[in-house]
Amino acid sequence: MSTRRGIKTIIGSFFRKRGQMGAEASNATFFASVFFVAALAGFAISFILWWFPYHLFSDEVYNIVVVNSPESFTRFNEEMQAEFDEMSEDYGDRYDYFSNWENMIDFEYIYVGYGWTEFIYKDTDALYDFVTFGKWMRENDAYLTVVFPKDFDEQIRLRQEGKTDAKPQILTYYRTNSMEYSQMRDGFVEEYLDYYQSTIRENYGLKITSVDDCEIRDDPIPTVDSGYGIKAFTETMSRTFVPILLFVILLYASMSIGTNVIAGQKERGTFTGILLTPLPRYAIIIGYLGGVVLKTLIPAFFIATISALLVQQFSLGAFLAIYLYIFVLAVFISAVTILISVINDTVVSAQTAFLPVFLILVAVCVTCIQSVAEREDFYMYLPVHGQFYGIGDVLTGNINVPGLIVSSLATLLLSALITFVTVKLLHSERYTVSIDTVDAKEVRRYREGGKSSVLEMFNKATDNFSYFITELFYPLIVLSFYQFLAMIPVVVSYMRKPEYSSFIQDLQNVGSVTDIFNKTFEIFGIFFKDPLFLGMMTLGYILIIITYFIHAGRVWKIKGIKNKIGACGYPLTSGKHIAKNYGLGLIFGFLMMTATVMVMRLTGQLTFGGFNLSASGMGAFIFNLFMWFPQGASEELMFRGYMIPAFNKRYKVAVGVAVSSILFSAFHSLNPGFTPLASINLVLIAVLFALIYLLTGDIWMTSAMHTAWNLTQGNIYGLQVSGNLASNTVFKIIYDANADPSITGGAFGPEGGLATTIVTSVCMVIVITLLVIKSRKARK
Amino acid sequence: MIKVVDVHKSYTKENETIKGVSFEVREGQIFGLLGPNGAGKTTLMQMIATLMKPTSGQILIDGLSADKNLLDIHRKIGFLTNEIKLDPMSTPNNLFEFFAELYDIPADELRDRRDLSFARFGITPFADKRINELSTGMKQKISIAISLIHNPPVIIFDEPTNGLDILTSKQVTDYLKELKEQGHAIILSTHIFSVAEELCDEIAILVDGRIAAQGTVEQLVAQAQAENFEKAFFKIYVENHVE
């Protein structure tokens, strides 16, 4: 009885407002809650922005393929054409949102577009050849195929003359990747075909009185079934993104709470008091395990629920299954955390020890991302793999009950084993007595055997290792976190767009890591034309910058917002200095890019093809322009303003410059078209910027140069920026047919070519000269 | 009540920290442990409090040994040392409640005990403040209140008046006297001779892991042929300490 009360009390301490446990735990919950609210907000935004003219930036299809069109139908369509023209004239320019917004705001999906529908006539004997129909629709931007029997007019006549009872059959096939298409198909049948039939009765003397005289069959295009449209998209998300997200949330929450409970209490000296109570050691462990599991589950529970609702899994079984999966996973991860917590004496050492576990589990997740077909059945029964696949299965509507039971039991058994070991360890003096008396200190020194022992060297090595890992991973985590947030509304709006159907169809074939990368680039390529994406990214970059200011303030113990910003390389002391450096940076960036383009022009790699701005892409163009400012600033902040001093504080400046430059290059290496030369160029550019940072003492100039470089490259000259192509540009540049990719950089853009190497090298010589002059002056 | 029989403790093979210590403490007795830093006082007290195991020898609390009856011993002892800290973010009220529940004190009794013990040390006005907002003396008084939450027959106090001002110090020593009168068996380690002289019924002087001398203050002074207790201590130390 007393044991149970003790366990309850320890668990209760996690939920107490005043107390270390509660306070620490609330940080993790706070993080996850922010995540959750942001995800929800992102989702909501896509609804609030219902008026947003998505159709401006996508290529909805309005055309109709007519197979074996009877003469009457062809003639009818021709007569309707005038009406179509009038409609589209009334609607106004569908690409010019700003002057035509009254119409655009009321945009609705209707079966003839706003008169934009064109008919494509085809003939075939194969009336059920949906593969071909699917192909025709894709080739001709059609959403619907209407298939007439070859002798439709004749059949109607025979039926009217009473010679046959058979109704002629009209088949319709429509795209299924957007809900709108089935509605548009219904509209077409009920209005257009109906009108056609009453018209031919009057005009051609045929006596069909209504649609009912024809049998109209309705076929969603079955070229691809499950892998089509929204379903394929949600399936991919459910099988990869959501499980990884849940794993990361569980790992993060468990790490921040679990390492605090025992290691943290040892550090603060509050653990011994608990050990002295008449509570058995196993009860202490179970109490803390219970608290960590419950606290960890709260955010995961929200995310799991929201995910299940988003992919429309409403059944009770699905919820129970997914909750069981995350519960079991939480128990397992928490058991590991508690074990690590018992072994370590401080929060930091426990977290460092937990990091490999974190990375291993994330790596396991990544190996789990493969197509369902390639998956061995026994994975379903394993710990970790079982939960990963299980969550994906549940979210896609399949509950593998034996897998659920076996993997859960196996995982719980494993957790019990880990907990058993933990309890045993808690009986050992080595892990319980952390009292820092003179004796104990002496003993510890004795145990570690003097100063330059192997242990100390090991500690030093792991210390440096964890410092590097933290500094290197921080940008990655921050970047991916905000990019993820920025993606949510974009993805949701994307799910409604038909233009990506083929992309989604291909996702089914994704089987390898390379495929995943390629698909990711492809989707980024699509998103780069979406102003919503560009806008969200702009916001994301701004948030990254703010996060870094806060982070630097915390790590370097700096008070006052101005000082924090200043410590990150943006001193706010002199407005004149900022204006001068930023302005010069913009000019230098523009000149550097222009010089690069001129090198390519002079070597005959390209010619100018005139202006390339069109009204239709103006929205994306403007959004794109604005994005470059925070984008340049955030990258400079991450790789120069923060990272160089971070390494400088512990090592030498050169280490900071080298590490940040290599990392900068590595960060861009995942972009499409990356080449070895590109990696060298990016290191060169990074070193150049780092030197300018050292020369000017801050990153005002490099931020501007970064922005100007990308902007000039992408939106003025229309070249790929690190593999990404902007949608709208000022100039059109045409590469020569014999252009040498080693000079132009090929698909990666100029940053992958020798032209950039030349320009950067020249600039570097100049900057190094200036640095030498500066240091000589300083010496005098 | 407390029986320590030929206890040895070594952290490493070559070096023994406690080299055969034996003594006994009865109910209603305050037993003082005196010794310089590094003599092994804390190690000895930690062993009595079951936090460490002796390498050899036996420690019995009310006839129970930690090997077999660990949790029963936990119910019988109250251990106070500077190294056991209070959760800085918590409040005295919360901590008292938390530990009371871990000691399985009935809910109806809990409040009375808390009120009594908080009133005694003047904690009541601070009962809902965070620990890190309180003074050192107040923290120590809360630590004492919590270490004695279960009214243990055996009390092990490691330098309870260390770092306290005279007034708080007096409060603590008065309380210890009171506890003694109630029949608790108390082990006390201290650096302060006046406290030892005033409180302890019996004193053991620990030098290099051995009891160099043991007895009442008068006995020790007589044994060392010194003018007062303080001088007796130094004499005994010098005689027994090996460089």
Image (cartoon, coloured by chain):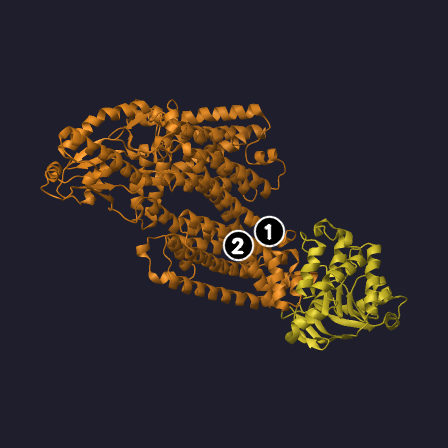
Chain colours: A orange, B yellow
> Where is residue A70 shown, x and y percent of the image?
14, 34
Chain name for mark 1: A
Circle 1 residues within 10 Å: few <14, some 14–19, many ≥20? some
In the picture of the structure, the residue carrying the numbered disc 1 is: A24
- In front: A119, or A430? A119
Residue A181: image quadrant is top left
Residue B166 picture quarter: bottom right
SS at circle 2: helix
Q: Is residue A337 above or below residue A220?
A: below
Q: Is residue B234 visible?
A: no
Examine the rendered structure and indicate whether residue A507 appears above or below residue A271.
above
Say if A467 sits above or below A292 in the image: above
Chain to which mark 2 belongs: A
Q: Which quadrant: the N terminus of chain A?
A: bottom right
Q: Are marks 2 and 1 in contact (CB under 8 Å)?
A: no
Q: For the residue labelled by badge 1, is the local secondary structure a helix, a strand or a loop?
A: helix
Mark linked to residue B141: none
Side of A754 relative to B204 (left or right):
left
Residue at image mark 2: A296
Q: How many marks?
A: 2
* Residue A369 position (above or below residue B179): above
Q: Is residue B110 visible?
A: yes
Residue lying at the far left in this picture: please name it: A163
Give the distance between the C-alpha atoms of the residues marked 2 and 1, in whole angstroms. 12 Å
